Image: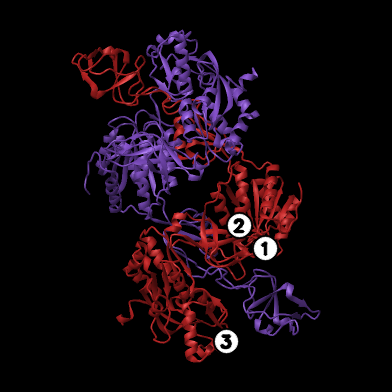
Chain colours: A purple, B red
Amino acid sequence: MKHNYLNNLPLDAAREIFLSAADEIGFTAAEETVPSAAALGRSLARAVYAAISSPHYNASAMDGIAVNAADTFGASERTPVLLAPSQYIPVDTGDPLPDGTDAVVMVEDVIDDASGSVTLRAAAAPWQNVRQVGEDICMGDMIAPTGTVVTPALIGAFLAGGVTRVPVKKRPLFGIIPTGDEIVPPTAEPKKGEIIESNSAVFSAMLSGWGAQAKVYGIVKDKKELLAAALDTALEECDAALLLAGSSAGRDDYTSEVIASRGAVLVHGIGIKPGKPAVLGTAKGKPAVGLPGYPVSAVVVMEQFIKPLIDRYYGRKAQPDETVEATLGRKLTSSLKYQEFVRVSLGCAGGEFACMPLSGGAGVITSLTKADGILEIPQNCEGLEAGAHVNVRLLRDAREIENALIVTGSHDPIIDELADLLQRAGCGFRVKSSHVGSMGAVHAVRAGQAHMGAIHLLDGETGTYNEHILREYFPNGGAVLIKGVKRVQGFMVQKGNPAGVRGLADLKRVRYVNRQRGAGTRVLLDHLLKRSGVSPREVNGYSNEKFTHTAVAAAVAAGNADVGLGIYSAAKMYGLDFIPLCDEEYDFLVASAYADHPHVQAFFNMLRGEAFRARLEEMGGYRIGSPSDE
Amino acid sequence: MKHNYLNNLPLDAAREIFLSAADEIGFTAAEETVPSAAALGRSLARAVYAAISSPHYNASAMDGIAVNAADTFGASERTPVLLAPSQYIPVDTGDPLPDGTDAVVMVEDVIDDASGSVTLRAAAAPWQNVRQVGEDICMGDMIAPTGTVVTPALIGAFLAGGVTRVPVKKRPLFGIIPTGDEIVPPTAEPKKGEIIESNSAVFSAMLSGWGAQAKVYGIVKDKKELLAAALDTALEECDAALLLAGSSAGRDDYTSEVIASRGAVLVHGIGIKPGKPAVLGTAKGKPAVGLPGYPVSAVVVMEQFIKPLIDRYYGRKAQPDETVEATLGRKLTSSLKYQEFVRVSLGCAGGEFACMPLSGGAGVITSLTKADGILEIPQNCEGLEAGAHVNVRLLRDAREIENALIVTGSHDPIIDELADLLQRAGCGFRVKSSHVGSMGAVHAVRAGQAHMGAIHLLDGETGTYNEHILREYFPNGGAVLIKGVKRVQGFMVQKGNPAGVRGLADLKRVRYVNRQRGAGTRVLLDHLLKRSGVSPREVNGYSNEKFTHTAVAAAVAAGNADVGLGIYSAAKMYGLDFIPLCDEEYDFLVASAYADHPHVQAFFNMLRGEAFRARLEEMGGYRIGSPSDE
């Protein structure tokens, strides 16, 4: 076997090398026999033939009498036929047809006689009302060929055909070895510097979806002997081994060294992003793979190498991926060195799919939970322009994406709460929210990319909220403003306000954490700064941007900043002190075309309801109602 | 609760009554807590919020040194900055950022000094190369709302957010009670009159696919007290009960009586076909349903009532069914009384879907295993004309149907064997075969409904096989003939030939079992009869038609007939004696448009291969090669 220590091998070449090696070492499904009733979803290792016919005897299909049809020939209304007691036998549905009979006359057509004879006013045709042997399945017929995935109906056919156990392909067992000094098992109370080991659970779940099984080993410290011993055990007990790197640099080489000591490293470094540092090899005649530590990188490597490996094991062709064509929402630059896998959000407000790359590096697992699809950018491509037509591989059912209510704009936890309440009520659609800030919402609604946008934009001149947006951005209509909630904005500071924040002027002195450009809260800050005569350039931390209120609160709570501007509920959640600055109106800009949309209606009905009011009270800092309520 | 003893209630009304009753008795999901790692595919009972941020501390994203960015301001190539040992701390990727630092300079950019000081030639921006607290997930953020189905990535997000256990909706447990005196557990050796109980396994598998669980009880004899006791146990231990009727008439009323004694029968008799005799009720505050005995009927009732019941339990809307538009291949008559569910086969040879109703009554489970979709015909519709455009609900992935190789025509087990060999070789497509006879194949190929057809048609005038078809039916081209196998046709008779069949003339005396009109074997019989001067009307059993060679063999083996015409391999399979009559040529008529189709090529490559030759030898009665080989 050749060693291919390469640093940036193109994906297809790397996969070809890896899968060929898997073929060479005979990584193919062994066979096992399972009860037919327990075979759901399994793949047949061989064709299954019926052991008996079904029905396996001639069965009456009616309640009535079994007769020899020949005895009834000529019977009609005018020329009834009389059958002596010896010429017929009463039968119920399902009864075997008695010897010497070949037809059943249903009980309604039989005229009883006191003597025990019966009269028939119609002739019976041979085999009428009889389920003949093999009507459903004939003994020896192939019920299903090799490779068939067992369905509920097939289970019924197996059992009806007398096949109580079926040969299926064994599920390959993957040994998963998490490694790293700083890695700890899942906990709600990790110590500083401890990294929660979540990857093994993610990969186990992925493997199970692909028809494989996982055995997760204990976390191995960063010692070569320990790693080698763990690999030996996994290769002993499993069909393949996956070594999960921690996130430390240099760890991958370590994995590579250990795999090489037990076999061969075939590929180290693949021209994909994320996922580059993967190690593909074989050890002791079994596939052995080192996965990168960042979850998103590792998921890409799992999909691009381990899924095809399992397909190869089962001897099945991969189902072509489901894709949709979508319009790219913003420019995307890409490295010429890598084939990139970009997680994207898909929206379908206007009947066509629009796709927006999700932010976050390879360490951000929520970029995967939020993703609706993956956009692949080929190696040697510099990127894509906004508006480009792209094919997106779907991670969710297209109908679910088409049916989603798209709420974009300013972040507030109440959007998630409303989404949850709608789900609890069984609304039947997803609420897809994204945090693009209030101005982002205005643009998205104008572009028809969202059903509605959440905004809280102060009109510095009038001191009113949001209404000026209709005038300025929708002078000819196209959107309506629906009142949402009133909420308190203020400074979030650490408990006891150790930095002594009193007002805007303090931002020149203490460390501030800001919101992103376009966020309503950023617009508010700028307005307040201007009023106070403080220049943004004077604010210490103006460029430290967060996308949500909770992210700002988290930064203050962690001591990364002394103060941030945000809503009361976020401060409360993090046990921060809160200095109220102003009440603001958090409203919804709804595209006119969707004002009557049933999802939009459902959203606002929930917003006006008792359940939501109760949640607001729990969260604190909100009121429902328009300013005129005051 | 109202009792609605109705005989033919429309489906929608019946479902509405049943589901409303389920609401009334509070048939909704309870909650349980499971480890996050074991929650794959489960539905969240409540929203899940992050317990901790991820990262939960400021982590270095690089190997390098942690610094206070302010100490580096002004550093450039021309004005390097020197940091004293007290001004920096070496860190590895993942390490917590030490107190007093707010940036990391990567090791490559650090110039060591013999004194322990380091030189920087670029300023560090605050928070550069730092994964700040909450970069991925902020404590308190909603990770997923109620009802979300847990994916692998979500498991990762839960664990990263410090959520080690999640609240999920309990899976409803259905107690399944098979009933009937003649019903026996699955076996390969049932006695005459015994009916194999396969339905409980089929329904358990269906339930598991819908997120429910099943507990199958022992078979209950036809005694009211026993049935009542079994129902009591099931209602005690489970969330709902399904009573599986045997096939005897009158059994359903029995189920109905027992359900009524424990609660209320809401509906008895639904205007659907198959599925009419279902019993829908509640007993002891839980759903209790009597399912018809025939598997296909019961499957329809499961899909139309139990699946929506489970959706209601979970508080989720049913996913809209995936459908395709197809052209109906033959006229379909329908009863005005019933909404009909017709199992159909779908083909896509010409790029458009063609749909053909499958034969077989409600007792024929193989009509379900063969079905690609379900065609619903509304109540009050008399039927549909051939060529009608219909919407078919898919039972299989549309891409799998589109990608299938369609081989229609004359039956021979070798088609199944070739399909199996292709699957073993990992061909990546299904072989879809249907038995429409040789003449059916000719018409299907002409109509573009099949890639190829299997034919064995004797030209009575020349004594040659199949070639005249090209001249007669494809005078202007459009098809090519590809040689298949030679096979022996003859009389299949019981062991020792007790009926003393010697030749065609005997068919007037003994009981014959025939093939369907259009079958090549039927054409052959007619040819032989004509040559022998025997009229079809003189043949005893001419109208007893079977669709396959094995069905003919099964009929002879069961004693339903004394003789049938068919191929040697079928006789051998059933241990019958065989009287050879002639060698014939079983060839393939391939539509010219598909002659170069890769699936077609793969099929013929397999046909010419060693593996297939070995199988033919095992089966007996075949040779590969054209007549000129002789």
Of B546 and A163, which appears nearest the observer? B546
Give the side of residue B528 with respect to residue A295, left or right.
right
The numbered disc on residue B300 is 2
Q: Residue at x 62, y 77 (%)?
A: A127
Q: Residues within 10 Å of mark 3 (few under 14, many from 20)?
A: few
Label 3 in the same subunit as label 1 = yes
* Number of numbered discs overlaid on the protein picture: 3
Q: Amino acid at mark 1?
A: Leu
Q: Amino acid at mark 2?
A: Val
Disc 1 marks which residue?
B336
Q: Residue at x 37, y 65 (%)?
A: B594
Q: Residues within 10 Å of mark 2 (few under 14, many from 20)?
A: many
Disc 3 marks which residue?
B537
The alpha-carbon separation of the residues under discs 1 and 2 comes to 18 Å
Please name which of the two marks, 2 or 3, marks the residue nearer to the observer.
3
Task: Output the chain of dot 1.
Answer: B
The alpha-carbon separation of the residues under discs 2 and 3 comes to 41 Å
> Which picture quadrant has residue A609?
top right
Quarter of the picture containing the C terminus of chain A is top right
Q: Secondary structure at mark 3?
A: helix
Q: Is residue B68 visible?
A: no
**Disc with the residue nearer the chain's start (3 vs 1):** 1
**Disc with the residue nearer the chain's start (2 vs 3):** 2
Q: Residue at x 72, y 46 (%)?
A: B284
The numbered disc on residue B257 is none
Q: Residue at x 74, y 56 (%)?
A: B6
Residue B102, percent from left and from top: 35, 17
Q: Amino acid at mark 3?
A: Arg
